[in-house]
Image: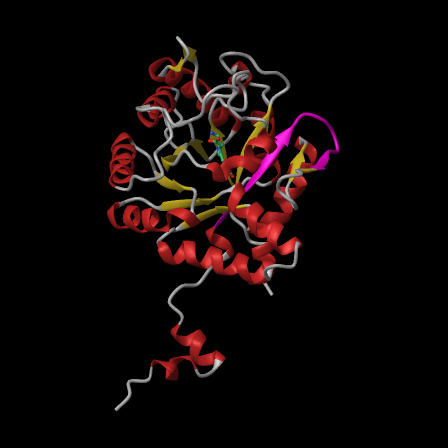
Amino acid sequence: MIIRPRRLRRTSAIRDMVRETTLSVKDFIAPLFVKYGQGEKEPISTMPGQYHFSVDTIVKEAEELWALGIPSVILFGLPDKKDAEGSRSWAEDGIVQQAVSAIKGRLPEMAVITDVCLCEYTDHGHCGVIKDGKVDNDATLELLARQALTHAKAGADFVAPSDMMDGRVAAIRNALDAENYQDTGILSYAVKYASAFYGPFREAADSAPQFGDRSGYQMDPANAIEALKEAELDMEEGADIIMVKPAMPYLDIIRRVRELSLVPVAAYNVSGEYAMVKAAGMKGWIDEKKVMMEMLTSIKRAGADIILTYFAKEAAGILNQ
Ligand code: PBG
């Protein structure tokens, strides 16, 4: 007798019935870039279909995402000026702070998350302050906490530290609690690799390091056990959600972190993953929409509860059909 798994693939209805993984618009967090100005919606050359918004237009974009059923956005800011410490990152009138309060003002129910990091705000492009030519961990913690606190004050539901300094989740949690922001959550980039897949983002956010690279603080792509340690530390320090980043080249890590985590696991489908699909699609080498859906499904199947993706809007359009 032949065992026939194909019986479960015979018709579309049967396939629907036995499908193990279903994507939902509720899984998505849409990343958005905000800059100073008025009425701006400037295309990002390295990421076709993504834009630099000003505060007024980012609110419109958030409204469109919300109308599609997408519950959340994560914001990245392009400051008016940069300095050695990244001081514009904790300015009360900073660009992210303005965008958060504008979006929450219009869409109070939408979950607004802010990326907490210094690299977009420092003139050297590193994620922390530099001492003796190196990124100083402990001196950076206080600045990250300051930045997170201004995001919370502006109304952010979650702050998302992406710097990979040791001890930053605890430092941010303490700073938020001390000022009575105990309801502001932390989505930590717990497992963030030193990845070349961030290239298109660094163009978009103008955040490339001016010397060296990030391998002194972001993780070695060859390591998996270390990812479990990073995930565990961030949970102990009080992270409400932990993230693995990038997603597609690290599906094994998503699975392993999912198995160990007692909090929701997010995966960041990063700029390079997006740009590759877009570029091949534009060349006619792949069916872009099908590849997009397959990629997002595989990230969910690997174990991600939440997916940060530049495809959020496009994929929502398909899922809502
Ligand atoms: C900031 C930050 C980066 C990304 C998210 N937050 C860039 C980096 O670490 O260099 C990358 C996101 C993407 O590539 O889509 N530290």
On the image, the x and y values in percent for residue 77 come to: 58, 28
Is residue 86 or residue 75 the one in the foreground? 86
Q: From which residue to which does the magenta span run? A: 28-42
Residue situated in front as seen by the camera: 183 or 51:
51
Quadrant position of the N terminus in the picture: bottom left
Q: Is residue 276 above or below residue 179?
A: below
93 vs 20: above or below: above
Query: For residue 38, what is the image quadrant?
Result: top right
* Colouring convention used in this rendered image of the protein: secondary structure
Q: Position of residue 172 (x, y in %)?
A: 37, 24
Split into 4 quadrants, where in the image is the C terminus? bottom right
From where the camera sits, is residue 67 visible?
no
Q: Nearer the viewer, residue 211 or 291?
A: 211
Indicate the quadrant where residue 104 lies. top right
Residue extending furthest bottom?
Answer: 1
Question: Quick one: 39 or 301, which is closer to the camera?
Answer: 301
- The residue sitting at 55% across, 12% down in the picture is 83
- Prevalent SS, magenta region: strand
Residue placed farthest to the right in the image? 39
Q: Is 276 left or right of 160, judged from the image as shown?
A: right
Q: Is residue 30 a member of the stretch shown in magenta? A: yes
